Image (cartoon, helix red, strand yellow):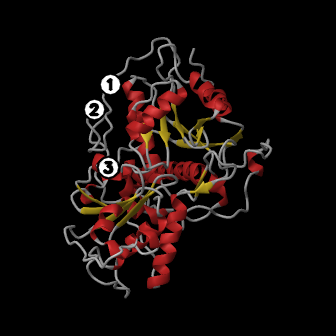
Amino acid sequence: MRGLLPLYRGLSPLVSSPGTRAGGVGISCGFHGTRSINKAQPNFGLLFDIDGVLVRGRIPIPAAKKAFSKLVDSKGQFVVPVVFVTNAGNCLRQTKAAKLSHILGVQIEPDQVIMSHSPLRMFKKYHNKCVLVSGQGPVLEIAKNLGFNNVISIDMLRESFPLLDMVDHNRRPKLPSNPLSNLPKVEAVVLFGEPIRWETNLQLIIDVLLTDGNLSSVHQTQKMPHLPLLACNMDLMWMAEAHSPRFGHGTFLVCLENIYKKITGEDLKYEALMGKPSELTYHFAEYTIRCKAMEREWKNPITSLYAIGDNLMTDIYGANLYNRYLEERIAREDSKAVAKIATATGSTVPEVDEVENMWESEFALPSATSCKSILVCTGVYNPKAEVPSDANQCIQEMVFHGHRDFRFDPALVEPGHIVKDVLEAVEVIFEQEKFSPQ
């Protein structure tokens, strides 16, 4: 996955110091909580997926409330640092936090919720450009909340260029229409999540890419770089109330990529891909976990992360990918230490690959040394299958549902544990960590 690292370069730093606001990302690491005296202090944090783990569509999963009763004390404060990492992207994190609070019976703060689009706060170089956003829900408000100041929606494009949306005969203009030229030239495209009318969004996004953001002009299909494209949420499928998984934003991206290539003969290129399984999203989550621990004034560094999810291709793949990154970072640090000793003794050793460190230089370095994956059977992963007693017998050969730009590696979809539900996941973690909050 090293090929993805250049996507993260050039971002603004996440943090300059532990007590300052994180480079505009909306996370504060000040000390706001009160340390629990004479109670076990955790050195691990929990990353929860939402759909298929805590809820199915709008229906809570029964085990979720029981699990979270184990994660808070008598005052309703978390006994371990907890964040929610979801690939949902069609609502504000405040809205998601309020819904989670109601479902779980626990107070969830907005800064505990990491949406698929949350890392866009760091892409400041696009915040003052004219950006087209695609998705559903309050997309303009979401974009402005993330720091974008000049935003255009698909509906705004339709109103200005009504002749471009021709698939639905009932929505075609009845009379000839002249394009309205009151919109500025689009300079970048941000894809938040699956839209309602796929044909409209696919058509107009392709139009924007093939006209270099000027819909008054005709398509230019010859080889040329297209506008910057940033995509959130790569889930091919997700689990709602239906018996089988439903199409996710990843399916929409498959359509967009194949239409673009069919027309131009060229691959669609992304400036950045975020949401699970992107390393960028897990790094953002790790930083948030540390912030929550600091707020409580817990002294132990957070060295272990546990990611609980229902989707092999996003939750498990992403956690294992980030775990591999953490292992490689430790190995590089060890190599540097060896290099320093060798320099002092006059020996020669291979140079440490500095290119790998360019991503790290943009962020506060993680304290975590591992990220362990736990798969629940209440969502995308077949809930009627028997739970294998040995996780090593899990998937070895399978159809890869991950995004086109992520390489399939069987080891990355191998969960550390397979459990029945989120309650069992929490119990396994407490047992692994020998942690008793009482």
Contact check, label 3 and label 2, Cβ < 8 Å: no
The residue depicted at 20 percent of the width and 68 percent of the height is: 184
In x, y percent, where is residue 298?
43, 23
Q: Which residue is mark 3?
A: 121
For marks 3 and 1, give the CA distance: 23 Å
Q: Is residue 93 left or right of residue 30?
A: right
- The residue that label 2 is drawn on is 19
Q: Residue at x 34, y 65 (%)?
A: 189
The percent coordinates of residue 138 (x first, y second) are 36, 49
Q: Which residue is mark 1?
A: 31
Three-letter residue code for mark 1: Phe
Callout 2 touching callout 1 (CB < 8 Å): yes
| Amino acid carrying mark 3 in the image | Arg
Up the image or down, 91 lies above or below 75; here it is below
Q: Quick check: can you spot residue 355?
A: no
User: What residue is shown at x 67% (from left), y 59% (from top)?
Assistant: 410
In terms of secondary structure, where does tag 3 sit?
A: helix
